[in-house]
Image (cartoon, rainbow, N blue to C red):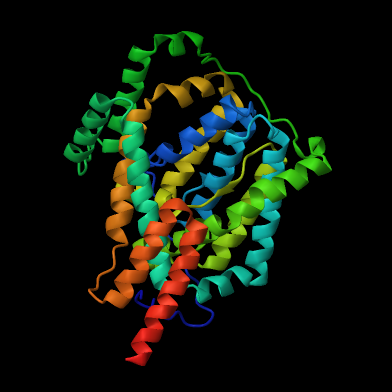
């Protein structure tokens, strides 16, 4: 349980938490690239989607969340939708992905405003939430190891740099990792540099809603949006609110607020050709691990994406492909370590540890299944406690 905040007298005005834009916020701003880049690259290269609309939607959502939450609350691609869309790219259209964003936005806006998301969150035991977070952290570590396997030399160098510079103020670890990874990637693939277009060129996204047909909405709803709901509830709504309140108890948020912002940013993003987006406990752990302490980090990242999308769209593909997967994997691995260690149960009671462990194992395969396993296991363990 979190400590209760001091009571504010009725009618008293409170100033919003300050935003920071110091070196630590800049260094941490790009800590979520390990999740962000692989999905965006897949949408652009496999689904042939316009990167301008995708990056602009993410950028605007990140800036808005930084100002609204005043904490490093992330905006990430919805993972199940991304995986299904790329795996079935031969039969799924880009319009179906955009439709899934619109449908997801409408669903989460209703769930948030109606209070249904909050009621669902209250019905889920804390052991199940901890298990989901642990499973997510372990999955990040495993995915990071797989990505690191593409170039172990670069991965080990990135890990050593991150450990050596973890408390350095003159040389923030994340900025050094990205700069070094970018230089290494260009040296290894000089053709990327030769093909990049870095000149200023103002470009606006194409309106997307007018291009959608009813079959796009049917496909986007049944194959993409609905299967994603349990994953979003467990990690991106409940998990994110939990992680935010654990790390920043002075700036607590609610499941309702996170659900509503998920709905709003997907409706707005879908209108400009964006892909389904969510928040994520792992992204917040990544920001915090590399020094972010306010909404400044997501604002910096978001503003960078907005400028890149609107003014330098010719360089987008280069920047998405230049940093080696092994370096991104090292960042993702460290994020998993941070998320796992921060959410490990601080008890030896088997009636707590057992449902957490079962949930984590199931969540490695599917977060929605993990939630169900956690609820059932927690209920059975509580029954045994009552019986004894």
Observer-nearest residue: 97 or 310? Answer: 97
Give whichever of 110, 170 is nearer the camera.
Answer: 110
Of all residues, the one furthest to the bottom in this rendering is 387
The residue that appears at 28% across and 49% down in the rendered structure is: 337
Horizontal relation, residue 224 to residue 278: left or right? right
The correct choice, above or below, for 276 with respect to 315 in the image is below
Percent x, y for residue 154? 26, 25
Residue 108 in which image quadrant: bottom right
Residue 160 image point, x, y percent: 19, 34
In which quadrant of the rendered image does the N terminus lie?
bottom left
x 54%, y 56%: residue = 232
Q: Is residue 281 left or right of residue 275?
A: left
Which one is nearer the viewer's eye here, 126 or 372? 372
Residue 86: % across, % down: 58, 34
Q: Most extreme residue toward the left, as rendered?
A: 164
* 168 shown above or below 250: above
Count of number-bearing discs: 0
Q: Quick check: can you spot residue 36?
A: yes
The residue that appears at 35% across and 52% down in the rendered structure is: 137
Q: Quadrant of residue 271?
A: top right
Residue drawn at x 42%, y 48% is 283
Q: Nearer the viewer, residue 91 or 297?
A: 91
Is 198 above or below relative to 179? above
The C terminus sits in image quarter: bottom left
Question: In the rendered image, is residue 133 in sight?
Answer: no
């Amino acid at each position: 349980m979190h400590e209760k905040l001091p009571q504010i007298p009725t009618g008293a005005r409170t100033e919003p938490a300050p935003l920071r834009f110091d070196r630590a916020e800049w260094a941490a701003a790009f800590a979520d690239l390990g999740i962000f880049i692989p999905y965006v690259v897949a949408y652009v290269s496999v689904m042939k989607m316009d990167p301008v609309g995708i990056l602009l939607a993410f950028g605007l959502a990140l800036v808005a969340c930084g100002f609204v939450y005043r904490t490093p609350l992330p905006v990430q691609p919805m993972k199940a939708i991304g995986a299904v869309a790329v795996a079935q790219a031969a039969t799924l259209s880009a319009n179906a992905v955009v439709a899934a964003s619109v449908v997801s936005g409408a669903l989460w806006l209703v769930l948030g405003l109606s209070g249904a998301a909050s009621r669902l969150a209250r019905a889920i035991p804390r052991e199940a939430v901890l298990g989901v977070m642990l499973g997510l952290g372990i999955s990040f570590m495993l995915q990071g190891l797989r990505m690191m396997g593409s170039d172990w030399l670069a991965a080990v160098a990135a890990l050593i740099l991150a450990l050596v510079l973890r408390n350095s103020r003159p040389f923030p670890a994340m900025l050094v990792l990205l700069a070094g990874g970018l230089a290494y990637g260009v040296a290894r693939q000089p053709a990327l540099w030769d093909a990049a277009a870095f000149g200023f060129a103002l470009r606006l996204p194409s309106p997307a809603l007018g291009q959608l047909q009813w079959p796009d909405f049917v496909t986007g709803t049944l194959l993409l949006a609905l299967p994603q709901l349990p994953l979003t509830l467990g990690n991106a709504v409940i998990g994110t609110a939990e992680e935010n309140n654990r790390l920043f108890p002075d700036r607590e948020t609610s499941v309702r607020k996170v659900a509503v912002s998920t709905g709003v940013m997907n409706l707005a993003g879908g209108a400009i050709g964006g892909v389904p987006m969510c928040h994520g406990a792992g992204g917040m752990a990544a920001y915090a691990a590399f020094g972010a302490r306010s909404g400044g980090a997501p604002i910096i990242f978001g503003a960078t994406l907005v400028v890149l999308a609107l003014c330098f769209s010719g360089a987008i593909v280069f920047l998405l492909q230049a940093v080696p997967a092994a370096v991104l994997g090292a960042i993702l691995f460290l994020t998993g370590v941070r998320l796992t260690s921060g959410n490990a149960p601080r008890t030896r009671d088997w009636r707590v540890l057992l449902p957490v462990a079962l949930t984590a194992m199931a969540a490695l395969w599917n977060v929605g299944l993990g939630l169900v396993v956690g609820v059932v296991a927690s209920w059975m363990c509580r029954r045994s406690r009552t019986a004894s």
